Amino acid sequence: MRYLPGPPGEGYPALTFAVHARIPVRTLRRMIYAYPTFHRAIEDALDRFE
């Protein structure tokens, strides 16, 4: 299992919001994150959906 890097909970709110708001993967890829290093796991996860 791969964990999101960074402070606990740093990436989870963004992913939770994206699921509930039905934000398309292509939109998530264009987002600019406050802490890009912490959100690289999000990019890795998005690679699995396309």
Image (cartoon, rainbow, N blue to C red):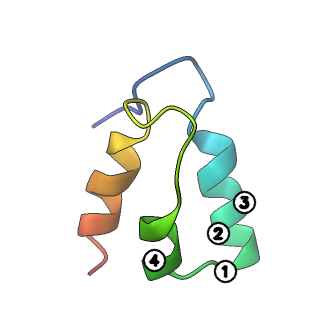
Q: Earlier in the sequence, mark 2 or mark 4?
A: 2
- Counting residues from the N terminus, which is met first, the one under dot 4 or under dot 3? 3
Where is residue 14 shown, x and y percent of the image?
Answer: 64, 50
Query: Is disc 2 in contact with disc 1, using a CB cutoff of under 8 Å?
Result: yes
Cα–Cα span, label 1 and label 4: 9 Å
Residue 49 occupies which quadrant of the picture?
Answer: bottom left
In which quadrant will I find the C terminus?
bottom left
Circle 2 SS class: helix
Q: Amino acid at mark 3?
A: Phe
Q: Are marks 2 and 3 in contact (CB under 8 Å)?
A: yes
Disc 1 packing (10 Å; few <14; some 14–19; many ≥20): few
User: The disc labelled 4 sits on which kind of residue?
Assistant: Val
Choose top left, top right, bottom left or bottom right for residue 26.
bottom left
Residue 33: percent from left, percent from top: 54, 45
Q: CA distance from mark 2 to mark 1?
A: 5 Å
Residue of label 2? 19
Secondary structure of the residue carrying tag 3 is: helix
Does residue 45 appear to the left or right of 22 in the view shown?
left
What is the crowding at mark 4: few (fewer than 14 residues within 10 Å), some, or many (at least 20)?
some
Q: Which residue is mark 1?
A: 22
Residue receiving disc 4: 25
Residue 17 position within the rendered picture, expressed as x and y whole percent measured from the top left: 72, 60
In the drawing, what numbered circle is on residue 17? 3
Label 1: state its secondary structure.
loop
Image-based side of 40 in relation to 8, left or right: left
Left or right of residue 1, residue 3 in this image: right
Amino acid type of the residue that numbered disc 2 sits on in the rendered structure? Val
Judged from the image, the secondary structure of the residue bearing numbered disc 4 is: helix
The circle drawn on residue 37 is none
Residue 11 lies, with reference to residue 24, above or below; the image says above
